[in-house]
Amino acid sequence: MNNTTNMCSRCVMDTTAKEISFDDNGECNFCKHYDTVEKHEVFSDKAGQEKLDLLISEIKKKGKNKKYDVLIGLSGGVDSSYVAYLLKKKYNLRALAVHLDNGWNTELAVANVEEVIKRLDIDLITNVLDWEEFRDIQSSFLKSSISNIEIPTDHAIWATLLKTAGKHGISYIVAGNNVVTEAIMPESWLYGSKDSKLIRSIHKKFGKIKMKTYPYLTTFDFFKFLLLRNIRWVPILNYVPFVKEDAKQLLIDELGWRDYGGKHYENIFTRFFHAYYLPEKFGYDLRRCYLSALICSGQMNREEAIKELESPPASKKVLNEDRDYVMKKLGLTNDEFDNIISNSINQYTDFPNNESLWQKFDWFVKMARKRITRVR
């Protein structure tokens, strides 16, 4: 761990994030960003509840004479499972759940998804990606040596949700993304997942088979689904008191849910990405981001977070097993894998991408995002 002179005095972000800056009190810019986002996007008080109640009425009205009111993405993790619970148990909405199977689910993730849909009586669609094709895409991202090798999965989730909502005429996607656990993330660590041009360019350079069935979205697709078809993205956890540990306990008690031991660890490749790939190749520990958000939201104190960071993100046994499993499943030799980890680091800007297009219309994107995600 870096010494405290390189760490924020309020949270646990440090100089491994190159864009970090500190004020005279040693507090970092990520904390200030959190405060700003919380002020403008978290409404878990009485006024927020009133807004949410109005939205629920609007959703039910919009869903009249349709089979479903809302669409949710269900990974089996805390956030998405809690969203499913709220929609069914508290708001009595007819939800269609979508699960993306990218070939890396743990048995526990599958069991959690099954328990959630069974106990809540929710319909489920599972989109199973073509393994040979997706393996080629994931291998390409590993060989690219950029930091965010989870872009192919995250983008496929976006695409599956929007296309499913469009197919079934569902106007609202209710998501588990939230401020109190996710508002802190250095842009230098993880470039966003919406850029399909980057996916295609990396796969074109390193891939071996043609991309035929992978679900992706063009820039126009985002415009079509979110603006022309007016599909709304509702971050419901920003409108209810969301305390992570309380949500876990409720899911355990009510739905027989079982904990994975780490954020997004329900997926083996994601666990490998968080606990092995980023720390080994880049020196990034994503726990700093999640723990810092919990500190800023008052759900954890800084001393507890520092103590957690003193231990590795997973046991040595799990790290070694995940490393070997990823190599075998992706068809990489030891030498190929070691070269990937030891090769010089690349940036997403080293490959053709759509960032300049998104930046050119940044004003429009911000306006659209506010409209799409706002609970009136």
Image (spheres, rainbow, N blue to C red):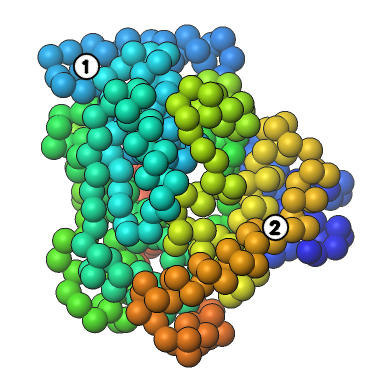
Residue 120 vertical position relative to residue 339 in the rendered view, above or below: above
Q: Badge 2 is on which residue?
A: 20
Instruction: State which quarter of the image contains the C terminus.
Output: top left
Give the side of residue 25 with respect to residue 196, left or right. Answer: right
Q: Is residue 277 shown to the viewer in this render?
A: no
Q: Which mark is residue 227?
A: none
Q: Report the amino acid beneath label 2.
A: Ile
Residue 118, given in percent of the width and then of the height, sits at: 32, 28
Residue 204 shows in the view: yes
Q: Where is residue 137 in the image (x, y as percent from the top left)?
A: 30, 70
Q: Residue type at mark 1: give it.
A: Lys
The residue lying toward the viewer, choosing from 184 and 95, is: 95
Question: At 24% across and 81% down in the image, what residue appears?
Answer: 208
Q: From the viewer's perspective, is 127 left or right of 307? A: left
- Residue found 57% across the figure and 71% down from its top: 320
Distance from disc 2 to disc 1, alpha carbons, whole Å, reads 44 Å
Mark 1 lies on residue: 62
